Image (cartoon, rainbow, N blue to C red):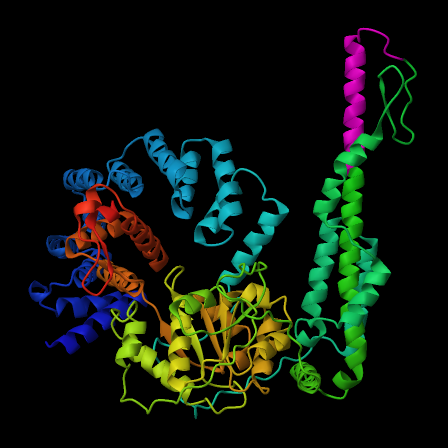
Amino acid sequence: MDKYEYKLKLDEIKSNLSEGKLNEAIALVDGINWKKVRMVSALCLAGEVYEKAGRYEDSKEMYLAAYERSPIGKTIIYRLAIVAVKSGNMEEAEDYYNEFVEFSPTDNIRYILKYQIQRAKGAPVEELIQILQEYKEREGSERWSYELAALYHRAGKADLCVDLCDEIILWYGEGKFVEKALELKMLYQPLSPEQEKIFRKMKQKRRGVIEVSPDEELLSGEILSGTKVIPEVPAPSVTFNTVNLQQELANNMKSIMEATEKETVSNHMEQIKELVNTIPYLKMPEENEAEAKDDDKYGHIATDEEIDGHLKIDFQGMLGEEQGGQMSLNVPDAPTFEKQITGQMSIEEVLLEWEKTKQAAQAAMEKAEQKKLEAAKARALKEAEGIMDRLNDVIPELEAGKTPRQLMEEEYTRKMQEAAKDGIEVELEEPEEPEAKPVVQEPESEEVVTAGESQQDLQEETQVEDVAETKVESEETEPKKAEGLTPEQKELFAYFLKVDGMEQQLYQAMDMILHKKEAINSTEGNLLIEGGRGSGKTELAVKIIKALRKETGDKGQRVGKIKASVLNQKNVLDLLAKVSGGFLIIENAGDLNKETAEGLALGLEGNTEGMTVIMEDTADGLQQALMKSASLSAKFDYKISIPVFTIDELVHFAKSYANEAGYEIEEIAILALYNRISNIQKVDRATYVAEVKELIDAAMERADKGGIRKAFMKKKTEDGKTIIHERDFQ
């Protein structure tokens, strides 16, 4: 088997394993002569397959082979211990546990390993509880917190069990173990209204009531053919005709006005949103004039936080102080006490004063709750009236047979025409000289920048601000290179090229985008980047943009970066106008709501001067984003996947990152680098690129410092790079 066939086999094993096709994965693993394999990650993959299949001896053999070849084997020792536990060899499991602790005495995962060994040995519940309590105090996780709650249940510690279940629900919010925690709590006491809502949504989602997964996922590196026919998705019919819809809205608004509890207001507002869910146009932002009109009608609507801030003032107002120092209660119809305190208070008088204080506190709290109710009703009515006004405006068009999507499309087209006619004035600051004071960036704002030529400029693009478009004379475009990345591009993407297949993914993605450079709109040639948290998705997006600008010679294109949750609060057309002809990076794309996704899809069909949109998130996040709008999904032709990095790939990344910054890691320091990365690795999650960057940043900072011991060390390489020594990683 040559290297190419071997690589295909490994990719197929990974694919089968991730898709749950265990039998197919086993057949492939059995067909490889592992004695000739020296790659640690491949041996660990084989060990994982055998472990899942219950073939523990074969799994142990693979892990031992990997351990012999690995310079740092903490994670492998952990897997060997787990395999020993599963196979019932407790003595061997304890030996591996002791080796793990000796190798990494501060790694909190030692508690999990100890717990699994003791549980397999049948240790008492109290001993198991103590182990997981120690782990929770130092780190904790959703899974093991639930395991601890289940132990409390077994031990009959109901209060501790319920408290921990509440904590899991509060901190993690969703997921398998949150659902288990909800079910466990229900054995002891009813769920709170908020917890009931979470539980109900989880059950609905599991039954497919809320979300429907697409039949197929876009594979990493797969190009969707431009001639592929995308089935037309019929617009859903409106649940009510216009007369019924108006009546239902009016009924809910009446119920809001008559509500005596905030929860009732919230429930009726949810019903209103469900009624108009099939007409996104009704939930589009109002014009400024309409907002001003609403403000005149309702004035300032206090938030719950503001009301709570006045609670102390209201409480003090309920308590007055009469002459002589005795307090009186200013509550209507409350009994008035004439007696003055002239000397030492008796116990009866103290209790009487305490009773008055409690009454004042109760009255103040009731007043605050009433204020919160009125504020909630005002906010709900303001939003509902806006929806009703927009419905009244479009009733003739709906009755004439227009679909909700046509309404929304016409609205965005109108706004785009107005923007083209009037011009969108974007207040931008002129770029400042390096000596000038730094610009203070407002948090959570959309970010738009021009691109510079230096590495510093590109780093600043990841913290993008609105700045004026720098006019740079376009350089003459280089002639088209042969297929594959140029040496300059390979140097730019050095962080990521260690990953198998990444060079081909990058080349195809950039080639796709370059082919649309003369386009007027952005209906194709947009890119998805998939990867875990901290995997370097934004870093990769920025480098792709830099490579594209270099390729086209157009360095004046503006680049925007914005979180999806912030984009939901913005005018999509204004934002697209700011980066027209350039690039827009949308982070955490899964947070896009339906209205923003539909609006973005329509905006990309207008004159964007060929702007390119790059959306990045985890696999689940991207799937959620694309499910919000079939039209938006059709505009993304290519996806790049950043896989979980192996320790060798992380070391390569670290060396490339240091080299680009003007440093070089000496050979003897590489082992120390392996050791440091191994120390930050977690068994239950991948190590993030961001963590390795922090490690190298700290080492570079130490390398720049002097010291007596460093006085006799070589500080620079022949080409002027600062040397990072072994001591800089300690």
Identified at 35% across, 29% down, the residue is 126
Residue 625 at x, y percent in the picture: 51, 71
Q: Residue furthest front?
A: 435
Please give left or right for residue 130 compared with residue 118 in the image.
right
Residue 727 at x, y percent in the picture: 22, 46
- The C terminus is located in which quarter? top left
Taking depth in this image into account, of 690 and 336 the one nearest to the observer is 690
What is the chief secondary structure element of the magenta stretch?
A: helix
Please give left or right for residue 119 compared with residue 301 in the image.
left
Taking depth in this image into account, of 296 and 56 the one nearest to the observer is 296
Residue 209 visible, this orientation = no
Residue 349's place in the image compared with 198, above or below, is above
Please give left or right for residue 593 compared with residue 613 in the image.
right
Counting every numbered tag in the picture gives 0
- The N terminus is located in which quarter? bottom left
Please give left or right for residue 222 compared with residue 557 in the image.
left
Which segment is the magenta one? 340-365
Identified at 22% across, 41% down, the residue is 708
Image quadrant where residue 235 sits: bottom right
